[in-house]
Amino acid sequence: MKERLEALRKEALEQLQGVADAATLNDLRVQYLGKKGQLTEILRGMGALSAEERPVIGQVGNEVRAAIEAVIAEKQEGFDRAATAHRLQAETIDVTLPGKAVNVGSVHPLNKVAQEIEDIFIGMGYTIAEGPEVETDFFNFEALNLPKNHPARDMQDSFYITDEILLRTHTSPVQIRTMKAMNGKTPVKVICPGKVYRRDDDDATHSFMFHQIEGLVIGPNIRMSDLKGTLLQFVQEMYGPQMQIRLRPSFFPFTEPSAEVDVTCAQCGGSGCRMCKHTGWIEILGCGMVHPKVLEHGGYDPKEVTGFAFGMGVERIALLKYDIDDIRHFYANDTKFLSQFAKI
């Protein structure tokens, strides 16, 4: 058995000297030292040896195992060094090359305009009120003087979830919720920003989802002149001190009297051009004095207090501010378009 062990050592060392890769090295390790390897097979025969021979053969077996393991470890270390050197060579970084610029995002133009509008009205003493985008028919319509089957509902073709639940068509429900939360106290002076939803076909000036900011003021002796002065200040802060507004009579169920508000065309300065259809004016929002029935739904006595309300689309304000011709640009996620506003 001793001769077999010595022959195995000689054979294994010769085989290991010619190993050229780590995979072959591992195969030889299994072949000679594995659980079913040649060394294990030889040592299983020790049971037939005498008590005097076993220690001698056991020592020889350990020497053979140690010799083979030493060569394998040396070879493996050499392969590891070569692999590391190759990887370092392949992954070499030229630190003299210019670095890659990291693209940094910016505030979306709609958010930027909405924040600017909010800042203007906060500077006038308004606070921000928010409400749910999924509303009840009562808050979205009935409390705003739009009872069921009212023809004015056709102007706000709606996404209904059930007969009484829908996606809000304007942020006016937040005004009712705010009034109810105030429990008849005055003054009320809030703006209500948020998303609204209507079943419109998407085109250059319409979208099924858009952003609104509405305002509400309630208190004793609130007049139409207060509304006009507020909107004039807003327009001049948003577009410049040269801008003027005009109010045209209109109809909204929740205000009486009601008006559409036009602003001086920024393109031609009021002289008339294609953008303003040669009128010198561009419509930007609707407004009016709060209807007495709306005040009652909000918990106020219309004989004691009055109020005004206004509502504007953020997209429309942004289109005019940045002279953009298509509302769909805001939603296309085109980085070439959006990057123009990064430094504005």
Image (cartoon, helix red, strand yellow):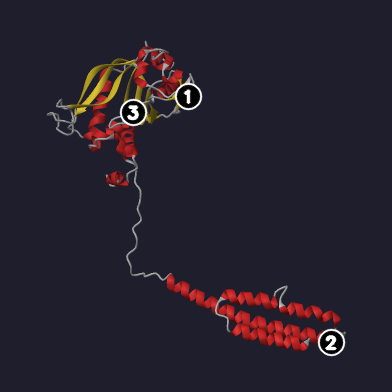
Q: Amino acid at mark 2?
A: Glu
The residue at which mark 3 appears reads as 201
**Residue 233 drawn at (x, y percent):** 25, 29
Residue that lies at the very extreme toward the top in this rendered image: 303
The residue at which mark 1 appears reads as 161
Q: CA distance from mark 2 to mark 1?
A: 92 Å
Residue that lies at the very extreme toward the left in this rendered image: 271
Question: Are dots 3 and 1 in contact, CB under 8 Å?
Answer: no
**Residue 335 drawn at (x, y percent):** 32, 46
Q: Earlier in the sequence, mark 2 or mark 1?
A: 2
Left or right placement of residue 277 versus residue 258 in this view:
left
Residue at 49% in and 21% down: 162
- Looking at the picture, does residue 145 appear above or below residue 232? above
Left or right placement of residue 190 versus residue 1 in this view:
left
Residue closest to the eye, 92 or 191 = 92
- Looking at the picture, does residue 338 appear above or below residue 42? above
Quadrant, the C terminus:
top left
Graded by Cα atoms within 10 Å as few (under 14), some (14 to 19) or many (20 or more), the crowding at tag 3 reads few
Q: Nearer the viewer, mark 3 or mark 1?
A: 3
Quadrant of res 332:
top left
Q: Earlier in the sequence, mark 3 or mark 2?
A: 2
Q: Nearer the viewer, mark 2 or mark 1?
A: 2
Left or right placement of residue 81 versus residue 115 in this view:
right
Quadrant of res 317:
top left
Secondary structure state at the residue bearing disc 2: helix
The residue at which mark 2 appears reads as 53
Secondary structure state at the residue bearing disc 3: loop
Residue closest to the eye, 5 or 229 = 5
Q: Amino acid at mark 1?
A: Ile
Q: CA distance from mark 3 to mark 1?
A: 19 Å
Secondary structure state at the residue bearing disc 1: loop
